[in-house]
Image (cartoon, helix red, strand yellow):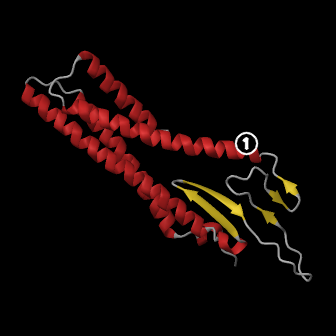
Amino acid sequence: MNSTFCDQMDPSVATSAFTELAIEDQIRNVWKEIESIRNMKCKTPHEKAIQDWQILRLMEVHNRLDIETTRQQENHLKQLMNMLKLDEIDAKVSAAGIKAKIMPEMSNKNNSSTTETIFTVRDKDDKAPIITDGFVDPMYKFNDAIAAIASQSSSILIERKREINKNLIILNHKRHLTHEEMKTQKHLMAELRALNGA
């Protein structure tokens, strides 16, 4: 009896996916707790200092969970790539972070007894399209552009998250916030939530 793809699936892939979901759930809970503490009215400077310290600690927890989420996503992707056994079809995986590109790669062997499909794969700087057995991918320029934009966007998002976290930590260390600083803080937290959901 032939086993299905699900039967062959490595249990660690499912475990990784569930772990990632659990961490994302923890991040949502941390945000709820931050909002709850932020909405508490402080009557004394001492209470305000405690509130700021609690928020700062929760932001640190959030950052660690965010890093762990990325690590789990990378691990999940790696496990999926291994499970596909791409080496059996002479395919090459180019992975960067949580993105992967599968590229067919076969050499042209001059063997008169066998006929092989020839895959020509471009170098990163090569402008020629991929040719597979005489077929030219009509979307190669667009695919390259999309991949470049996705890679750049990912770097921009990570850098923006760092900037927001740094600014929030600075604001949380202040004893008193002006009305403008409170608006900035609220805006930064909303932006960080939106980026984490992107």
Which residue: 59% across, 65% down?
81
**Vertical side of 136 occupied by 173: above or below:** above
Closer to the camera, 181 or 54? 181
What residue is disc 1 on? 142
Sort mark 1 into few (<14), some (14-19) or many (20+) by Cα contacts within 10 Å. Answer: few
Q: Where, quadrant-wise, is the N terminus in this rendering?
A: bottom right
**Vertical side of 143 occupied by 103: above or below:** below
Name which quarter of the figure residue 130 lies in. bottom right
Which residue: 57% across, 58% down?
95
Counting from the top left corner in percent of width and height, residue 176 is at 16, 23
Closer to the camera, 152 or 184? 152
Secondary structure category for the residue under label 1: helix
- Number of marks drawn: 1
Q: Looking at this rendering, what residue extends furthest in the top direction?
A: 179
In the rendered view, does 11 fall on the left or right side of 113?
Answer: left
Which residue: 69% across, 52% down?
125
Counting from the top left corner in percent of width and height, residue 96 is at 54, 55
Counting from the top left corner in percent of width and height, residue 64 is at 32, 50
Counting from the top left corner in percent of width and height, residue 139 is at 78, 45
Amino acid at circle 1? Phe
Q: Looking at this rendering, what residue extends furthest in the right direction?
A: 112
In the rendered view, does 58 fall on the left or right side of 81?
Answer: left
Q: Looking at this rendering, what residue extends furthest in the bottom direction?
A: 113
